[in-house]
Amino acid sequence: MKPVVDAFVGPTTRGYRPEVVGTIEAALKRLDIASARWAVTSVVPHRPDQRRLAGEIRAKVLVVAGIEDATFPVAETRVMADAIPGATFVVLDDTAHLAGLENPAEVNALIEDFIR
């Protein structure tokens, strides 16, 4: 289970947010592993390039990256944000892939500010 959790959390959450790690581990125990493997494989290594499609987005978009995200590193997330016209791009410290779970106060404040 540790490799899966490590795909979603970084060292800050692993070391200082045991409740987040526990939440992820509990969720993983409820999963059908074959279905989860298929979902992750289809989304991560085999996903098509969507930058052209993202370039057609006309709504205001906030793209949030976690500095510790090993699944979608900041550079990759920045490429996605750059493909969306006028997107706002923010990198959160001490956060990995599950920003809303790992760092809810900062994410909520960021969204509230963006909406205003």
Image (spheres, rainbow, N blue to C red):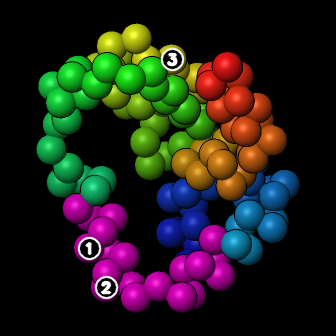
- Give the overall secondary structure of the magenta segment: helix
Mark 1 and mark 3: Cα distance apart in space = 31 Å
Residue 60 image point, x, y percent = 45, 21
Q: Relative to residue 15, is residue 114 drawn left or right?
A: left
Circle 3 SS class: strand
Q: Are marks 2 and 1 in contact (CB under 8 Å)?
A: yes
Q: Residues within 10 Å of mark 3 (few under 14, many from 20)?
A: some
Mark 2 and mark 1: Cα distance apart in space = 6 Å
The residue to which callout 2 is attached is: 34
Q: Residue 94: say if magenta.
A: no
**Comparing labels 2 and 3, the label whose residue is closer to the camera:** 3
The residue to which callout 1 is attached is: 38
Residue 53 image point, x, y percent = 18, 30
Going by the numbered disc 2, the residue's amino acid type is Ala
Q: Earlier in the sequence, mark 2 or mark 3?
A: 2
Which residues are drawn in magenta?
24-42
Q: Relative to residue 10, is residue 84 drawn left or right?
A: left
Count of labels shown? 3
Going by the numbered disc 3, the residue's amino acid type is Thr
Residue 88, numbered label: 3
**Comparing labels 1 and 3, the label whose residue is closer to the camera:** 3
Q: Nearer the viewer, residue 40 or 52?
A: 52
Mark 2 and mark 3: Cα distance apart in space = 36 Å
Circle 2 SS class: helix
Circle 1 SS class: helix
